[in-house]
Each structure stands twice: as C-alpha cells, then as structure tokens.
Image (cartoon, helix red, strand yellow):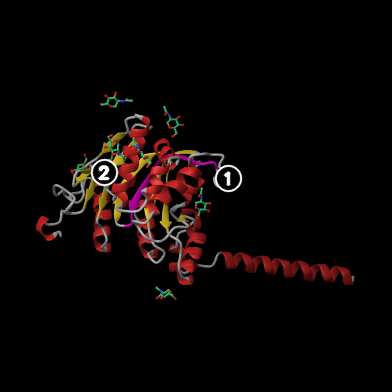
Amino acid sequence: MRGNLFWKVATALSTLLWLLTFLYQQRPTAGVVAELPSVQTLPATTNAEVTTIRPKQRTLLIGIMSVAFNWHRRNLIRSTYLQEKPADVDLLFIIGKPKWENQSSIIRHEQQLYGDLLVLGCEEHMNRGKTYEFFRNTSTTFGDPHHKTNKEGVTYRYLMKSDEDSYIVLRNFSQWVRDLPKNWTYAGIHLTYYGQHYMQGRGYLMSMDLTQYIMAHPYALKHSWGPEDMITATWVENASNLTGRNVTWASSRHIQQYGKHEYDAKWTPPVGNETLLIHGCKQPERWFKIHRDVQKIRKGVPIVQPDRNSIE
Ligand SMILES: *[C@@H]1O[C@H](CO)[C@@H](O)[C@H](O)[C@H]1NC(C)=O
Ligand SMILES: *[C@@H]1O[C@H](CO)[C@@H](O)[C@H](O)[C@H]1NC(C)=O
Ligand SMILES: *[C@@H]1O[C@H](CO)[C@@H](O)[C@H](O)[C@H]1NC(C)=O
Ligand SMILES: *[C@@H]1O[C@H](CO)[C@@H](O)[C@H](O)[C@H]1NC(C)=O
Ligand SMILES: *[C@@H]1O[C@H](CO)[C@@H](O)[C@H](O)[C@H]1NC(C)=O
Ligand SMILES: *[C@@H]1O[C@H](CO)[C@@H](O)[C@H](O)[C@H]1NC(C)=O
Ligand SMILES: *[C@@H]1O[C@H](CO)[C@@H](O)[C@H](O)[C@H]1NC(C)=O
Ligand SMILES: *[C@@H]1O[C@H](CO)[C@@H](O)[C@H](O)[C@H]1NC(C)=O
C-alpha cells in the first residue's frame, strides 16, 4: 500500500519535471540571442589551411627579414597577404639572436602562437651575415628531407629573401615562381648599380641546388658581410665561374618599388594586374591601401592610383 503511494508520487513528480523541461525548451528566446549564428555557420578561418593535406615537396620558402620588436609588422603580414598562402609555399620571419630578455619573451610567446619564426644564432644586422646564415640554415635543413633538423621531411625548390615592407601578391607571385626554371636559377628584379649586376633585395630567390652549391664552397662565407643583395650576386657569379654552368637570371619588372627610388630606372604605378610584389610600404596606410587595391583589381573594380608627384 505504502509502495503504491510512493510510485504514484514519483510518477506525478517525474511528469511535472518533464512538463517543466518541455515548457522551458519552448520558451521564446530573446531576439538578440536568436540572431547569433550557430557555431556550425561561422565562417571557416585558417582551419582550411591546416586541414588541407600539404605536399612534402614544396615550391617556395620565403624568409622575411624581421627584428624581435617588430611584432606588429609581422601581424600586418599575417593578417593580409599571408591569408592567401598556397599549400606549396611557406613563410618564416627571420630574426637574429636576441640581446635582451624583453626580446626573447616576445619571441617565445609569438612562436607558441604562430610557430613561424626562425631565430638564427647571428647578430641582428642586415649586412653582417644574416642573409648568409638564413640561406645556410634553410638550405641545410630543407634541402635534405632526412636531415636531423628536418623533423617533418619537408623540402623546397626555391629559397627566397624578402623584407617586412614588401607587400607580396602571394598567389600571383607563387605562380610566377612555379613557372621558373627549376635548377640553377636566381630570380627577382635585376638591377645594375655602378656596374654590378644583382637582384634587388626587396625579394629575390635562388633554387635549392644553386644555394646548396654556394654553401658547400668557401666563397660565400668569406664574403658574407656587405650590402646583402649585391654580395648574393657575387656568390652566384662565383658558383657559375667554378662550375662553368650558366645560372638563369630570371627578372620581373613586376617586382616593383612603390614610387621612385634611386636604384629604379623608372617609375611604375603602385599596383596593377601584373604586380607580383611592391617594396617600400613602411607606412601602414600604404600597406592597407595596397591590400584593398589588390582585392579590387581582382574584382575588376577601378582603383585610384596615387598622384605620381605626391610619392617620395
Ligand atoms: C628592452 O630592454 C633593454 C635592456 O634592458 C632596454 O634598454 C630597452 O629599452 C627595452 N626595450 C623595450 C622596447 O622595452
Ligand atoms: C637553424 O636554426 C635553428 C634555430 O636557431 C636551429 O635550431 C637549427 O639547428 C639550425 N639549423 C641548421 C642546419 O643550422
Ligand atoms: C635540380 O635540383 C634538384 C634539387 O633542387 C636536384 O635534386 C636535381 O638533381 C637537380 N637537377 C639537375 C639536372 O641538376
Ligand atoms: C671563387 O671563389 C674562390 C674562393 O674565394 C676563389 O678562390 C676563386 O678564385 C673564385 N673562382 C672563380 C672562378 O671566380
Ligand atoms: C668570375 O669570373 C669572372 C671572369 O673570369 C671574373 O671577372 C669575376 O671576378 C669572377 N667572379 C667571382 C665572384 O669570383
Ligand atoms: C653558357 O652560356 C653561354 C652563352 O650563352 C654559352 O656559350 C655556353 O655554352 C653555356 N654553357 C653551358 C655550360 O651551358
Ligand atoms: C593575379 O592573377 C589573376 C589570375 O590568376 C588575375 O586575375 C589578377 O588580376 C592578378 N593580379 C592580382 C593583383 O591579383
Ligand atoms: C585587371 O583585369 C581585369 C580583368 O581582366 C580588368 O577588368 C581590370 O580593368 C584590370 N585592372 C587594372 C587595374 O588593370
């Protein structure tokens, strides 16, 4: 008898509980909450890149010469042109040995977040062997899929040096690189300065085989200080001299300078359909405008070119 009552009460309570749950679920939700997109409908961000199966043999590794304190510059690059990085291209920020703890701590945190810094053991100075150390380190690691420092077995066909103030139209630039000769190639924009031929420092690359040859011979180490782009040309020339092999010098005038500069023969409009890279974008406003102009050009929307006389 007592058991019977217990079950009646229990059934009544559970029915009530079910009813309350049902009513709670049917309650009208506040407008603002209902309008938020569900997790499933949020746009995919960088995960697309992460989940894509990437080839182990890749086309291009870009090294952007940076310094520890320029984290904001690196973020500008990450949030603009790097967003369209193809699967066969990678980019690392190249930093010299930190002198102070405030530099090391930026590097540590940033590396944990992005993992795209390469901190070399050399002095932080553009013209004192940093470019040499960049090409030496990366050609050793990424020229051999079994090298002990190459944990993922990734190799690159070309190694490139560029700058923090070079805006790279990355998708188009990568296509230009894929079409280059694969071996014994030195590419960028060819300039001549007091009779010296070289690929200007805003963005130049060497094929892996040429870089490995250069690094295996003493000339480059002996000539690792000085204007980095011009001395790189002498390494290439020496390698060509020693082997009797012709190096392909591939030059594109669409590796541009923003406005005019003493080492540029003529003025080129800042951005156009054929632009591959634009150097000289230190000011963030200029950087943002170029980024927007690239998007507009792709949609066929006309862009306003800056007044030629207003550019220094
Ligand atoms: C970093 O530390 C060095 C040495 O303590 C100091 O001279 C410098 O001003 C610091 N720089 C910044 C940006 O905090
Ligand atoms: C390249 O530099 C990284 C970071 O300093 C270092 O861990 C690695 O051993 C270097 N690799 C070579 C081949 O020198
Ligand atoms: C071209 O370069 C690749 C490495 O980048 C090398 O494996 C290959 O032997 C080279 N081919 C020739 C013909 O030199
Ligand atoms: C290349 O560099 C080496 C080492 O510095 C030098 O001895 C040699 O004369 C150079 N060779 C040629 C052919 O330019
Ligand atoms: C390469 O050879 C040429 C002609 O022999 C010579 O003038 C030049 O100095 C050599 N270059 C290098 C970097 O060794
Ligand atoms: C290099 O180029 C020169 C001039 O075009 C040509 O005479 C020579 O045969 C070439 N050498 C090689 C090894 O291809
Ligand atoms: C890049 O290449 C595409 C075609 O692949 C072209 O439509 C576009 O205009 C080019 N230029 C820029 C700045 O994107
Ligand atoms: C770039 O190419 C597109 C499509 O071919 C064209 O509509 C547009 O006018 C071009 N833009 C510039 C700046 O040349």
Tell me the element at label 1: loop
Q: Which residue appears at 39% of the width and 62% of the height?
A: 67
Which of 107/44 is in front?
Answer: 107
Image quarter where the C terminus lies is bottom left
Q: Which residue is mark 1?
A: 148
Determine which quarter of the picture holds residue 249. top left
Q: Does residue 178 show up?
A: no
* Residue in view at x 39 percent, y 67 percent: 69
Disc 2 marks which residue? 198
Is the CB atom of the residue marked by disc 2 within 8 angstroms of ligand 5's nearest atom? no
Magenta residues, dominant SS class? strand
Residue 113, percent from left and from top: 49, 60
Q: Is residue 161 magenta?
A: yes
Tell me where residue 257 appears, x and y as whole percent.
Answer: 21, 51
The residue type indicated by label 2 comes to Tyr
Q: Quadrant of the N terminus?
A: bottom right
* Magenta region, residue range: 153-164
Q: Who's the residue at 49% across and 56% down the image?
A: 115
